Amino acid sequence: MAEGVIKISEAEEAPYLPLSDYDFSNNDSRLIQLGYKPKLNRRLGVISNFAFSFSIISVLTGITTLYNTGLTYGGPVVMTYGWLIAGFFTMTVGLSMAEICASYPTSGGLYYWSAKLAGKDWAPFASWLTGWFNIVGQWAVTTSVDFSLAQLIQVIILLSTGGMNGGGYRASKYIVIIIHGGILLVHAVINSLSISVLSFFGQIAAAWNILGVFLLMILIPTVATERASTKFVFTHFNADNGEGINSKVYIFVLGLLMSQYTLTGYDASAHMTEETKDADKNGPKGIISAIGVSIVVGWAFLLGITFAVTNIPYLLSSDNDAGGYAIAQVFYQAFKNRYGSGVGGIVCLGVVSVAIFFCGMSSMTSNSRMAYAFSRDGAMPFSSVWHEVNKQEVPLYAVWLSALVSFCMALPSLGSLVAFQAMVSIATIGLYIAYALPIFFRVTLARKTFVPGPFNLGRYGILVGWIAVLWVSTITVLFSLPVAYPITKDTLNYTPVAVGGLLFLTVSSWIISARHWFKGPITNLDI
């Protein structure tokens, strides 16, 4: 064993050891302390690390995808104030994750944290549960993002050929799934390139998201011939949702989904730490800055677009030019009413499409690193394959696995979009459960033993952690509530079915098999 390298058992007793205690001259020292041999190329700085999380959060993606939901359940009031509410509580989750990331900067991220914080007796099960919720949640994010891009491309084609009212071409569900597969293929090819190339794309993605937000939030309401009043944007509550729900509180709660769905994916900064310089500092910075910047630019984007909203029922109607795709109709209508042509609106949708493309690309990057780390610890079938890296130090097989799984997760859309929604609901609830588990262990089992890294919340760590855990518990219940009445097979909210099914499979596989052989994170050092 190299001089200065400690055994993983010793690392467990001292969760964070000052780097000054060891004679290491490179950024891999903390990773070695945690028990892992460095295999990935450490090229990312704090900006690049931030860019991956920021481009996965991608306010242009989340808001565009679920703008219909925001308009339906509460409208401007829910979107304007709900965004800030979700943003505040999301920041508490991010701060707690950043504190843990500073102590354990590994690609495994959440599942590794759970293992270290749950204690020796609970470590294997805590790691198993967190890891599977995390990786399936990430696959669901990639699925929902790339499928949303395929749907938006369908709408762009529809509008480009005349729209619903002009005999435009509307692609079938089979064409949409083929487009989805093509997008995943391109993302897999890009993610097969070196980390320096991915870093370059990631920074472009971050810049595109910021510039795109400010361009559209100014351009759309400026071009629109009819604009909403300030009173409408900040006080109008849409209770006429047509879903049989009359309680304003209930409606407000359902409308929060748009904001909370958007503000996910920032665990990417943790999964990229083995490729980040000064990871115990820059990983936490990436998480916090990605959330903070997203909250600000996302709110600005929401306000700008909502000032161009004047007729909510028409925007949600399947009879409009965009076939009921609300934000596409807003863009198209703004230019068509002023210039007699909606081409400018289609170009604006193209700006959004590029942002969604980058979002899916970065999401697959995060997926592959999680699969690489999880299989490195033997948790996945055929683990020896998924943690192999190529000459460019990229986990190539994990990349293509992520693409394949994300394609398969979209296939239920061919039968029913309701079934597809059940699958991708894991992207919000499932992923947030994975976020909350290590935080829960941090404020309970590891309350007195956790030793923080360079970034920490000090005496406020426990309080912030409990707020984060309670928020995730709350949205898990709220987003599982029925979204329409009467409840039928077409209106049932399948979120509890999907998330409950994942929980059942994860726990049952543990009881039947994994408890006999999975021991949690294991060292791969040659000791």
Image: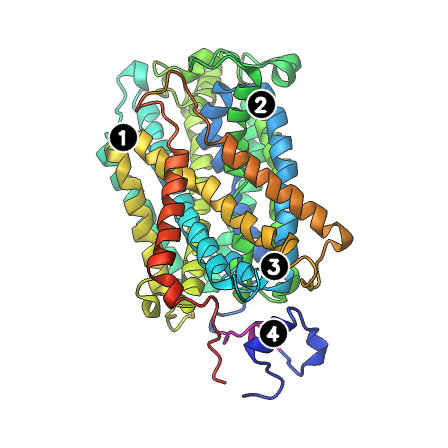
Secondary structure at numbered mark 3: helix
Mark 4 vs mark 3: in front = 4
Q: Quadrant of residue 221?
A: top right
User: Magenta residues, as a range?
Assistant: 26-38
Neighbours of disc 1 within 10 Å: few (<14), some (14-19), many (20+): few
Q: Name the residue tied to disc 2.
A: 78
Ranked by sequence position, the earlier of labels 2 and 4 is 4
Q: Name the residue tied to disc 3.
A: 101
Neighbours of disc 4 within 10 Å: few (<14), some (14-19), many (20+): some
Q: Name the residue tied to disc 4.
A: 11
Neighbours of disc 2 within 10 Å: few (<14), some (14-19), many (20+): many
Ranked by sequence position, the earlier of labels 3 and 1 is 3
- At label 2, the amino acid type is Val
- At label 4, the amino acid type is Ala
One can see residue 203 in this view: no
- Percent position of residue 239, x then y: 52, 13
| Label pair 1/4, CB-CB below 8 angstroms | no
